[in-house]
Amino acid sequence: MNTIKKLSELAVYLKRAVETYSQRDYEQLHQELCARCDQLIMEAFMDRHPGWSIVEGNAACMMYLYRNWSFSRRVEENVVQLSALANDITENYDDCDDKFLTAEAAAETIKVAERVYDFSKRVLREQHLFIFLFHAKHCTEDSFCRCMNMTDGSVAADIYMLIPHKDHETTPQSMLLHELGHCVNIALTGDPEIPPEDFALVMKLIGVDAVECDIPEFFAYV
């Protein structure tokens, strides 16, 4: 997978894999992805930000597969999962040459959240956040936060920063901060669609109509 740098290339690879891979091939691929993940987490630790990694290019493609594939001991299940991932990429993403948010700008934004809010300790805790910088557009989302239930029962999140196709006014840093707001929501309730109960009082105090408001999005904005 070392030559794959775009989501479209990953989709082609996955479609080829489901046609030709044996269970042994899937095991080797999963081991390769696990090793790459461990390497990225170690690099983040050495760079003094053990709670998060910013990935693009090949690393982003590898971690996309690693975080979205629940490796199975049954070859049939692996075929189903990788086929679904390939179809999702093909149907919902388009590669672009544009670059919306640089790794340097993303890192500086996260460091502000660390400095002001102690973000890793208070929000990420023992989880590792991957921030994907894909040179691609999604069919419906400008960017999004994906919530995941881990095998140990904990909840983790990843952030996908894409090329906007709707919101061309918001700065890249503001959009990333918004997605970090969803991470806060996940840390508090375990579900980005369920805001904390106390937030209803906050909305009442500032005069926001809960009926007309997309409350999870407003929470992330706040």
Image (cartoon, rainbow, N blue to C red):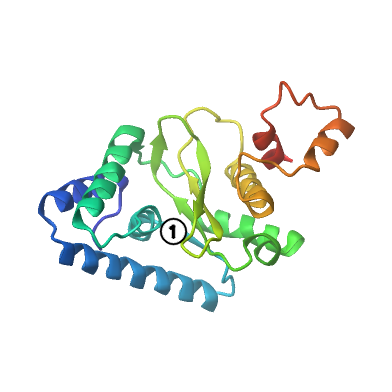
In the image, 81: left or right of 207?
left
Residue 43 vs 19, above or below: the answer is: below
Residue 45 vs 168, above or below: the answer is: below
Residue ID at (84%, 38%):
202
Residue annotated with mark 1: 55
Query: What x and y, as percent, mark residue 48?
Result: 59, 75
Q: Nearer the viewer, residue 205 or 170?
A: 205
Residue ID at (31%, 60%):
71
Q: Nearer the viewer, residue 40 or 82?
A: 82
Q: Nearer the viewer, residue 51 or 100?
A: 51
Query: What x and y, as percent, mark residue 93?
Result: 35, 37
Quarter occupied by residue 61: bottom left
Query: What x and y, as percent, mark residue 177?
Result: 64, 47
In the image, 82: left or right of 126?
left
Residue ID at (69%, 41%):
195
Residue ID at (29%, 59%):
72
Residue 173 vs 129, above or below: the answer is: above
Quarter occupied by residue 30: bottom left
In the image, 27: left or right of 109?
left
Quarter that holds the N terminus: bottom left
Q: Is residue 102 visible?
A: no
